[in-house]
């Protein structure tokens, strides 16, 4: 697709879906759009956009494709092992002296997709400190993904591969596949439709988790987002990034690396 066509498509996507593709890596997005049009069966982008205006279900599918909401519970299991064995226990200890009696940790799952990530935290916190009241803020711009999260699923067998039989028994409805987390777990999360690129954020988090979201963004946008996450954390709070992601020159933002995928706000 040439740049003039891309400019026109970007404008149409901004109008129809309120997604600004200027923040996304150009070449990768153009390739993705080409292959989507080829698979759609429409002869041209004009035909496809005319169809999108008439078919809300197709619009949802297109939004899902653009925002890419692949996920699973305890994604990159070894990192979650560190979360359970050292990161969360430390944060739980630190927060004791900082917050009101009985309250727990504050976690923001940014780009939470259909909820597997915030639900993973809810399970671990229930295992580690069930008596305390934790706050998990889970945000995404994809309304369809959030609706699924708020319904507790459905989740596929692949998405469940790192869930232990004990967790399945304790935190999921009986039966499946497909699987649904039970309403006690859903109730522990505050879901919100939220665009990372433009909406204001809550603050004073012990941990911000943004995994497999910024990979699609330009270097400038990534930098802007890591500064935003830094501002949302309390000093000493932890930034948890995706398995293949790194924050380049973290010290310039005010982070110090503390093991693969983890940074502490200094
Ligand atoms: C690949 S999923 C990652 C899900 C989860 N964090 C994980 O690692 O399993 C990426 C998510 O980022 C969301 N996303 C993309 N751009 C976003 C934006 N500008 N604001 C908020 N969420 C966004 C998508 O809707 C999608 O659900």
Image (cartoon, rainbow, N blue to C red):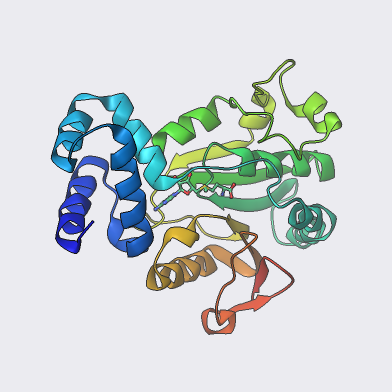
How many numbered badges does the structure rendering display? 0
Who is closer to the viewer here, 189 or 10?
A: 10
Q: Residue furthest top?
A: 175
Q: Position of residue 238 (x, y in %)?
A: 66, 65
Q: Position of residue 60 (x, y in %)?
A: 35, 32
At x 37% / y 46%, what residue is drawn?
Answer: 66
At x 77% / y 63%, what residue is drawn?
Answer: 94
Q: Is residue 120 left or right of residue 33?
A: right
Who is closer to the viewer here, 132 or 91?
A: 91
In the picture, the quarter occupied by the C terminus is bottom right
Who is closer to the viewer here, 5 or 113?
A: 5
At x 31% / y 48%, what residue is drawn?
Answer: 33
At x 74% / y 71%, what residue is drawn?
Answer: 259
In the picture, the quarter occupied by the N terminus is bottom left
Q: Residue 189 is drawn in which quadrant?
A: top right
As drawn, 142 above or below 232: above
Q: Is residue 47 left or right of residue 227?
A: left
Q: Position of residue 58 (x, y in %)?
A: 31, 29
Q: Residue 258 is drawn in which quadrant?
A: bottom right
Q: Position of residue 45 (x, y in %)?
A: 18, 42
As drawn, 258 above or below 64: below
Q: Is residue 21 left or right of residue 80?
A: left
């Amino acid at each position: 697709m040439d740049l003039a066509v891309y400019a026109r498509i970007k404008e149409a996507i901004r109008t129809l879906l309120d997604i600004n593709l200027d923040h996304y890596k150009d070449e990768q997005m153009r390739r993705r759009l080409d292959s989507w049009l080829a698979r759609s069966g429409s002869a041209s982008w004009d035909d496809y956009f005319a169809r999108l205006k008439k078919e809300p279900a197709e619009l949802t599918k297109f939004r899902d494709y653009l925002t890419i909401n692949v996920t699973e519970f305890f994604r990159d299991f070894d990192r979650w092992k560190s979360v359970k064995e050292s990161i969360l226990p430390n944060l739980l200890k630190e927060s004791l002296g900082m917050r009101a009696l009985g309250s727990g940790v504050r976690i923001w799952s940014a780009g939470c997709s259909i909820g597997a990530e915030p639900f993973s935290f809810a399970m671990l916190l229930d295992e580690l400190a069930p008596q305390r009241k934790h706050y998990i803020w889970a945000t995404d711009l994809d309304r369809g993904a959030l609706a699924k999260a708020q319904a507790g699923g459905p989740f596929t067998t692949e998405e469940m591969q790192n869930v232990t039989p004990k967790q399945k028994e304790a935190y999921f409805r009986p039966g499946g596949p497909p699987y649904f987390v039970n309403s006690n777990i859903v109730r522990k999360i505050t879901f919100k439709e939220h665009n990372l690129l433009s909406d204001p954020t809550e603050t004073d988090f012990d941990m911000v988790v943004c995994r497999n979201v910024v990979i699609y963004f330009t270097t400038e946008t990534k930098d802007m987002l890591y500064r935003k996450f830094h501002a949302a954390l309390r000093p000493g709070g932890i930034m948890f990034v995706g398995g293949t992601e790194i924050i380049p020159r973290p010290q310039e933002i005010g982070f110090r690396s503390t093991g693969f995928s983890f940074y502490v706000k200094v």
